[in-house]
Image: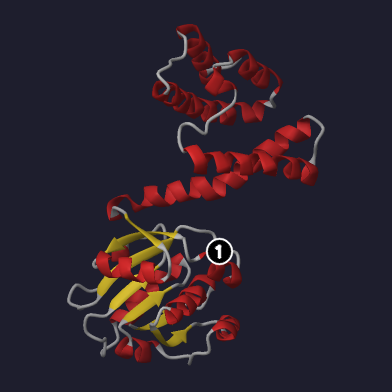
Amino acid sequence: MKFGIIGAGIVGTALAVRLEEAGHECIGVHTRSRLSYERFCQYLVKEHLTLDALVSSADGLFITTQDDMIREVAESLSLKPLIKPAQVWIHCSGSLPSNVLRIRNDLSVRCLSLHPLQAFASVEKALAILPGTHFGIEGDDQEFGEGIVKDLGGIPHHILASQKSLYHAGAVVASNYLVVLASLAVELFAEAGIEGTEALASLLPLMRGTLYNLEQVGLPQALTGPVARGDAQVVRGHLEHMPSKLIEIYQGLGLKALELGQNKKAQQGLIYSPEELNRLKSLLSKFI
């Protein structure tokens, strides 16, 4: 495939490098930023081309701009008179469906979304972890998309375009809200006298251990702690000493933990005693 990159950020640069290594040919790159183009050329020296040149020559165009620019780029491309027949337009947004690229129904282009389910802090990091990265795929030619993902060394998953916002929400919970949970834990440690970087440093091994357990035994078996054990007295102690602004967050998470705990026990042929279950539900639903 001859492909072009529109938007030379971290993702666009890393995709171009890995696709070239897989045997595809990057014919050029288009970006508004001189600095991003210069950085792109540190990894892959390619000509800076106009949109007209890219759209008339490439088999595929990767639109790797910020999400709020994707529609605008597609609109600009749709106005070009010499679009290569059967061209595929690909964006890498986790929240936008592929049909955001479908500006005109009379164009023969295929619209596709390939979203890497990973957080890339730098081009070097992206290049290192693209192999083995999971991708969410939806759009006109998912078989073609699967091939691209496999050429990148990734793992493809087909998602429903109509529910893509929920897919993205799941990714946000797993990635962004993990940082929020760490912040919450650090705040509670500070109340107990362990503050700042010391608190985070002491919590990270525990978090890594939990991630390891998730890898080894999965859900719900990786759940441990007082809710999983049915220890309502410990949960009550947490709530009695907790800053009031954090109680509702703790309770919401605790109710989800109780649901997982019930599933875990069911898989083991066990149940909470009625007294345990009622005490936990009461504490996690309302605490005065």
The residue at which mark 1 appears reads as 120
Check the image and report above or below for 17 versus 136. below
Mark 1 secondary-structure assignment: loop
| Residue at image location 46% in from the left, 85% down from the top | 29
| Residue at image location 51% in from the left, 82% down from the top | 32
Residue at the extreme left of the image, as rendered: 106
Q: Is residue 146 left or right of residue 194?
A: left
Quadrant, the N terminus:
bottom left
Q: Is residue 135 left or right of residue 192?
A: left
Can see residue 76? yes
The answer to which of 156 and 233 lies nearer the viewer is 156
| Residue at image location 25% in from the left, 86% down from the top | 84
Residue type beneath disc 1: Phe
The answer to which of 282 and 277 lies nearer the viewer is 277
| Residue at image location 44% in from the left, 88% down from the top | 28
Can see residue 6? no
Q: Quadrant of residue 203?
A: top right
